[in-house]
Amino acid sequence: MALNVLVPFAKNIWTADGPPVNFNGFEYSVRMTIIQLRAGELFVHSPIYPVPEMLEQVNQLGDVKYIVSPNKIHHLYMGDWQKRYPTAKMFASPGLKRRRADLVFDGELVDYPPEDWAKEIDQLIFGGSLVMSEVVFFHHKSKTLILADLIENFERDWFKGWKNWIARKAGIVAPDGQAPLDFRLSFLGGKSKAKTSLERIKAWQPRHIIIAHGSCYKDNAMEEINRAFRWVG
Ligand SMILES: [Fe+2]
């Protein structure tokens, strides 16, 4: 897929894939999601590096109003977006303010949506992990669930050689993409909180799932959720 190009995913949602980012020695494909809210305001989730050609596309969709990090490792280009859209509001995921003290945030994401986007997007903090709390979003109109690392689903030939072997062991290769094994293990003792979060996700009845790494799930979202989160029990 072409990089740095906005591609329609569902009604009022676009995604754009960016150049791979090195994560612990692995080249991770990365994906940004943009939701067009009423009055043409844009909600930018997990931003990729803002190249000018892509921003022309973004500007045609509306005004960048919110820049959002879903978890504390999805923050790399937030500052670059803030520079280009200084009036946009920046929202930090749990733990990110401390990690990115160089950035100015307007708010911190919590277990329910702020008034800014509550009518169109719901959210929750996926609870129970000792290391990372990911904020999960749900776009009502298109019934789309938006995840970052709670499901990673790299194409089967994305990683080569021993990295492919490790990625398989970590459970992040299609068609059985899940949260990486180390992330799943961090829920030790926190399964009941994870279960509560998962029930809330299921209650939204998502039809589609956008993820940040690997192939999204255009269909059968509920089945994919049951499959990918079977570790929750
Ligand atoms: Fe990630």
Image (tube, grey):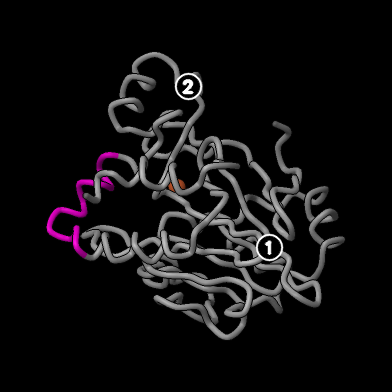
* Disc 1 target residue: 35
- Where's residue 1, x and y in %? 69, 31
Residue 144 against residue 175 in the figure, above or below:
below
In this picture, which residue range is highlighted in magenta?
A: 181-192
Residue 1 against residue 141 in the figure, above or below:
above
The reply to whether the C-beta atoms of the residues labelled 2 and 1 are less than 8 Å apart is: no
- Where's residue 58, x and y in %? 79, 58
* Disc 2 target residue: 156
- Where's residue 117, x and y in %? 61, 78
Q: Residue furthest left?
A: 189
Find numbered disc 2 in the image and state the secondary structure of the residue it sits on.
Answer: loop
Closer to us: 116 or 101: 116
Q: Does the magenta stretch include residue 190?
A: yes
Q: Earlier in the sequence, mark 2 or mark 1?
A: 1
Task: Give the residue drawn at x 59%, y 46%.
Answer: 31
Task: Give the residue drawn at x 82%, y 62%.
Answer: 61
Q: Does the magenta stretch include residue 110?
A: no
Q: How far, Cα to Cα, is label 2 from label 1?
A: 28 Å
In this rendering, would 109 be left or right of 199? right
Residue type, numbered disc 1: Ile
In this rendering, would 151 be left or right of 45? left
Q: How crowded is mark 1: few (under 14 residues within 10 Å), some or many (20 or more)?
A: many
